[in-house]
Amino acid sequence: AREPPALPGAGGPRALWRAGLSSSASSSPARGSPQDMLLLLLATSGLLLPGIGEKVVTHATSAADVRSWVEEHCSAPGVVGFDTETRPSHRKGRPNPPAVIQLSTMHACLVAQVYVAPRHRLGRRGAWVESAREAREGADGVRHALTATLEDRSILKAGVGVDNDAIDLWQFWGLEVNGRVELAGVAERSRSLARLLATTTGVELSKPKALQASDWAAPLGERQVAYAAADAWAGRAIYERLSSLDASSFGLDAVAALLDAGERSCCELYAMRRARQAARAALADVAAQLGEEGLPHRLGSGEESHASAKRVITALSGHARTVARSLADSKDTRLPVDSVLDAAPEIDEVSTLGREDRSGVVQRK
């Protein structure tokens, strides 16, 4: 096997770049490219594959960028990591449209900006400026160029919270995402992307709040691109590990057959989300009124009434859970993530820096 490529900043003292983001300017390149940063993430995790190549991350700002990446890396049938990023909304009930779609194989990532807002702020507290017309039109082209890949059922999209991402893409952009592979497990034991990655591979994925809450509808910076790429790659890496642990459940053919038999459309998912929201709001309103005002006087007064109110509130909470289950997807396409991980051997802890081989690439202990 060919030696992995040398990494910038690999020699000498340095801090671990988690998710490709440097915490110490003196310990890493001042302005490493997203490709270099993701390479360093893979290297520090011990998962850097020989021959991975230099162009790990493609930041797509035009339809041509998307078509080129898909032709080179996204063959069907296959599996890609999938995620989206959205500009935070500070108005309750007024979500913003998804602005970035990420796809990833084990070897290459696509960070595609599908929306650029008409105006964006320069920095966290800078002035508001008009976004370039070329950037906005380029994002429109990127969105249209991704349509066929997202609709393709033979290209599975693995990640955490993929149904919610798919609903948002359908609601705002009319994009249908098929082949959705949810990796979080059942709701009672749902795991975050970072926790799943650590559990399955031992890789620590940092999720800086400043980047999570950054403006994804503005032209992207290098740190944003690296962050987004790492999220999508994490989904693909988790799937890779789960399929190696249980090929009968997580193999490509098995997952595709499960989805063919029971995957709901994004329109159906959206309708079910609205129904759950309405039911939860109604039950919460009744529970709040009982908690604040107590029950009618005919049920008694003092401690007796208070105890009765508590029993009713407890019963309402149970009914709320029943409603949520009844509105859940009756076509169960969940994978046995929890049982597979419970039976899997523990991952050896990855040290902060690991050790270096002669090529200067950080390896797992």
Image (cartoon, rainbow, N blue to C red):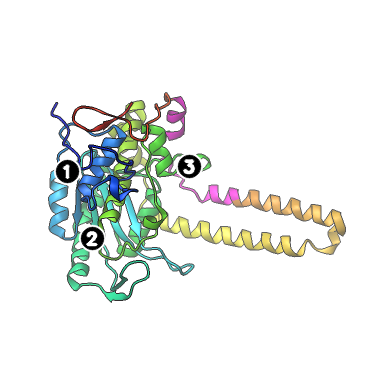
Looking at the image, is mark 3 or mark 2 earlier in the sequence?
Answer: 2
In the image, residue 328 lies in the stretch drawn in magenta: yes
- What segment is highlighted magenta in the picture? 321-343
**Residue located 22% across and 50% down the image:** 32
**Mark pair 3, 2: CA separation:** 30 Å
Judge the density around disc 2: few (<14), some (14-19), many (≥20) Cα neighbours within 10 Å: many
- Who is closer to the viewer here, 28 or 40? 28
Residue 154 visible to the viewer: no
Decide whether residue 20 is among the magenta residues. no
Left or right, residue 332 beside residue 223: right
Label 3, secondary structure: give it. Answer: loop
Residue kind at label 2, given as amino acid type: Arg
Identify the residue under disc 3: 190
- Compute the Cα span from label 3 to label 1: 30 Å
Height in image: 86 above or below 131? above
- From the image, which quarter does the N terminus lie in? top left
Mark earlier in primary sequence (3, 1): 1
In this orientation, which residue lies closer to the viewer: 290 or 96? 96
User: Type of residue at label 1?
Assistant: His
Location of residue 10 with respect to 113 vertically, above or below = above
Image quadrant holding the C terminus, namely top left
Mark carried by residue 333: none
Residue corresponding to mark 1: 73
Q: Are marks 2 and 1 in contact (CB under 8 Å)?
A: no
Compare residues 327 and 286 and report the one nearer the observer. 286
Q: In which quarter of the view is residue 348 placed? A: top left
Q: In x, y percent, where is residue 241?
A: 33, 31
Whether label 3 touches label 1, CB < 8 Å? no
The residue labelled by disc 2 is 143
